[in-house]
Image: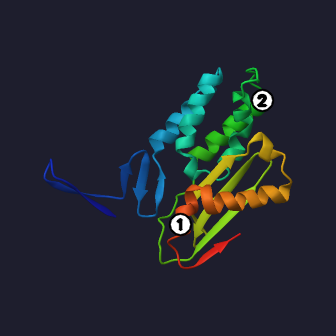
Amino acid sequence: MWILADPSRRRVVKTHYVPYVGHLLTNQGVKPDPEKTKAVRLMPPPQDKLGLQRFLGMTNYLSKFIQNYSELTAPLRGLLHQDTEWCWHEHHEAALSRLKDALTSPPVLQYFDVRQPVVLSADASQHGLGAVCLQHNKPVAFASRALSDTESRYAQIEKELLALVFLKVHSPVTCYVYVTQALTMY
């Protein structure tokens, strides 16, 4: 339960959530604003590269709620290469549908507690790197990025090491590494 003071109207309001920059802050944690996810869900399939860039820009804002975001968007990002001609196929439609499904049923990210132990996990796939920060087996933050053409040709063990470097140094979950006493990485 949250209590909000509205000084302009001289009243106090009890509420179970607070909207804040496209997110809802609840007593369970942070989740995307349903209005944002509804807008993404209702977007028609893109008709050209510019439309796809616009769509991916909207979904990227909500990517912190989606596990393996870079893997989900890989077929769509393939259409954005300069040397690729625009040709929308069934596998692009399927990728778009999977991404929309992931956005409309995202997990609630729990609030980070510096007193609790942290588990950081990293993984690599053919198309991207992923990382997650967990407390009590609940996600606090997700992070992912696509592999460059050169990185995608690495051996799998090299990709896994790159995922650990991404997790420890370059990802948005890095900030949780420096403020916790008990840390497990895998």
Q: Quadrant of the N terminus?
A: bottom left
Q: Nearer the viewer, residue 62 or 149?
A: 149
Q: Nearer the viewer, residue 34 or 68?
A: 68
Numbered circles on residues, count: 2
Residue 56: % across, % down: 60, 35
Badge 1 local density, few (<14 within 10 Å), some, or many (20+)? Answer: many
Element assignment for label 2: helix
Q: Residue furthest left?
A: 10
Q: Residues within 10 Å of mark 2 (few under 14, many from 20)?
A: few
> In the image, is residue 108 above or below residue 56?
below
Write the residue at 53% across / 36% down: 58
Q: Where residue 44 appears, x then y in whole percent?
A: 60, 26
Q: Is residue 72 above or below residue 124?
A: above
**Residue visible at 73% across and 21% down in the picture:** 86
The circle on residue 90 is: 2
CA separation in Å, label 2 and label 1: 40 Å
* Residue at x 67% of width, y 65% of height: 121
Q: Earlier in the sequence, mark 2 or mark 1?
A: 2
Left/right of residue 26 with respect to residue 140 in the rendered view: left
Q: Which mark is residue 62?
A: none
Q: Nearer the viewer, residue 14 or 103?
A: 103
Left or right for 19, reference 77: left
Q: Tell me where residue 13 appears, x and y as whole percent.
A: 24, 56
User: What amino acid is found at the position of numbered circle 2 in the picture?
Assistant: Glu
Q: Which residue is mark 1?
A: 176
In what element is the residue under mark 1?
helix
If the image is split into quadrants, where does the C terminus sit? bottom right
Q: Which quadrant of the figure has residue 120?
A: bottom right
Three-letter amino acid code at disc 1? Tyr
Q: Are marks 2 and 1 in contact (CB under 8 Å)?
A: no
